[in-house]
Amino acid sequence: MIYRCTLVNRIEIPLKAFSQENTFRLYLNDTALLFSLLELNFADILLDKSFMYKGAIAENFIAQTLFCNGISLYYWSYGNKAEIDFLLYNQDGIIPVEVKAGDNTKAKSLNIYMEKYNPKYAIKLSTKNFGFENNIKSIPIYATFCIEK
């Protein structure tokens, strides 16, 4: 019924070895269930209305999709200064994934992570179109299914 996304305290492989099992986030395995529990209407998303839980719903959708693609769920936090929503490990190394629910895609946390760890690239998921700039791959949220191990 839920997916567990565990905090990683070191950006090294294997991520599982550096995960803090007692610090985690939980996501529902079905985003429609989250809608129902929050008593939201699908029109609120379709009409792109702004509301407090829009980011949480986007993150839940991403977690659900990544998990279905066989990707283990980890996140990173740098105290109160920065937080990366998801980390994935593939042939390119450890890749940070930042989720933005709307068009405002400023990613201070992603910039901090990239300065600190210098990944080959990063992924930003948002409502914007595909792109690649400053080593950041922009991917529309609807295309999350394209992300693989």
Image (tube, rainbow, N blue to C red):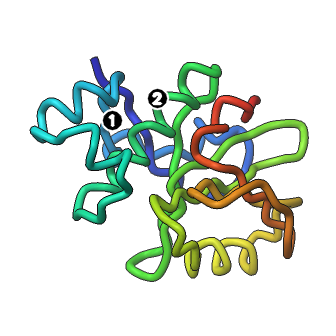
- Do the residues under discs 2 and 1 have CB atoms within 8 angstroms? yes
Secondary structure found at label 2: helix
Q: Is residue 27 left or right of residue 142?
A: left
Q: Amino acid at mark 1?
A: Tyr
Residue labelled with disc 2: 64
The spot of residue 129 in percent (x, y) is 71, 56
Q: What secondary structure is found at the residue carrying circle 1? A: strand
Q: Is residue 123 above or below residue 141?
A: below
Q: Which mark is residue 42?
A: none
Residue visible at 63% across and 20% down in the picture: 70
Instruction: Please state which of residues 55 and 115 is positioned toward the viewer in this rendering.
Output: 55
Q: Quadrant of residue 149?
A: top right
User: Left or right: where does residue 82 sit relative to residue 48?
Assistant: right
Q: Which corner quadrant of the image does residue 37 belong to? A: top left
Q: Identify which amino acid the numbered label 2 is placed on.
A: Gln
Residue 7, above or below 119: above
Q: Position of residue 53 (x, y in %)?
A: 25, 56
The residue drawn where x is 71% and y is 51% is 139
Write the residue at 74% across / 32% down.
146
Quadrant where the N terminus lies?
top left
Q: Which residue is mark 1?
A: 27
Please name the residue shown 67% across and 79% down the image: 111
Give coordinates of residue 128: x percent, y percent.
Answer: 64, 60
Disc 1 residue crowd, few under 14, some 14–19, many 20+, Cα 10 Å: many
Up the image or down, 111 lies above or below 59; here it is: below
On the rendered structure, is 93 left or right of 101?
A: right
